[in-house]
Image: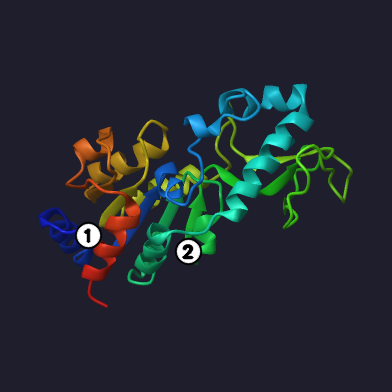
Amino acid sequence: MAFDGPDLDRAAEILAGAESLLVLTGAGVSAESGIPTFRGAGGLWRNFRAEELATPEAFARDPGLVWSWYRWRRRICLEASPNAGHLAIAGLEDRFPSFLLATQNVDGLHRRASSRRMLELHGSIHHSRCTGCGTVADLPADPGPEDAPPPRCAPCGGLLRPHIVWFGEGYHEGVLETAFAFARTAGAILVAGTSAMVWPPAAIALDGQAHGAALIDVNPEETEISRAADVWLAAPSGESLPALLARLPR
């Protein structure tokens, strides 16, 4: 059954009257494509939890173990396909001359859904960064065997690491500043699939609302953002976002 109702009508009215749109997405959007959530039971690998591996300390102790985990995760991401929610967000981008997608997800599914104007707040699982010279580069299309040796930088021979923001690390330069600046001038902010537990990304939405943006939350579960939102669409993004896009004038 198609998603419908007065909340959808109100969300469509907000977007139709806005000249600029910021979309913020979290793990719930990619979970609909079968990608395990970072903190969920599906994220357990070889009896390790994500919080035990996604740290600079874990990489310093055993880079091979961390790379094995990332190769496993990367294969899952590459085998997944963008879902209807990803595609609807790419469709929203075409409706707004001023648009920005800021995603907490590192899986690359938004790019594969043809989103272009976007920030990957936590980096990308498909990129590496040299611990020596700092070069950021694409990883090979095939992740290779999980237990292959850690990769090395072609220009300098330094050890490569995933280009991901790990626990205990700051965000990559300029990323948060760009997101906050856009939020403070946006006419509307749409948040999809985030638990609102990760800060400062959740703060971007609330700060934008405080500066005058109408806030729409898309999440089947109630969160701090849905409680503060002007409209809460209590459904998965794969159901509600295509319905919302269909309501907008072309």
User: Which corner quadrant of the image does residue 45 belong to?
Assistant: top right
What residue occupies the far left of the structure in this picture? Answer: 6
Between 99 and 231, the residue placed more toward the observer is: 231
Q: Amino acid at mark 2?
A: Ser
The correct choice, above or below, for 245 with respect to 26 in the image is below
Which residue is label 1 attached to?
1
Q: Amino acid at mark 1?
A: Met
Label 2 vs 1, first from the N-terminus: 1
Taking the spot 49% from the left edge, 48% from the top edge, the residue there is 34
The answer to whether residue 167 is visible is: no
Q: Nearer the viewer, mark 2 or mark 1?
A: 1
User: Which corner quadrant of the image does residue 57 belong to?
Assistant: top right
Between 229 and 71, the residue placed more toward the observer is: 71
Badge 2: how crowded within 10 Å, few (<14), some, or many (20+)? many
Image quarter hosting the C terminus: bottom left
Which residue is label 2 attached to?
115
Q: Secondary structure at mark 2?
A: loop
Residue 115 percent coordinates (x, y): 48, 64
Residue 28 percent coordinates (x, y): 40, 44
Taking the spot 88% from the left edge, 45% from the top edge, the residue there is 156
Q: Are marks 2 and 1 in contact (CB under 8 Å)?
A: no
Badge 1: how crowded within 10 Å, few (<14), some, or many (20+)? few
Q: Secondary structure at mark 1?
A: loop
Between 175 and 25, the residue placed more toward the observer is: 25
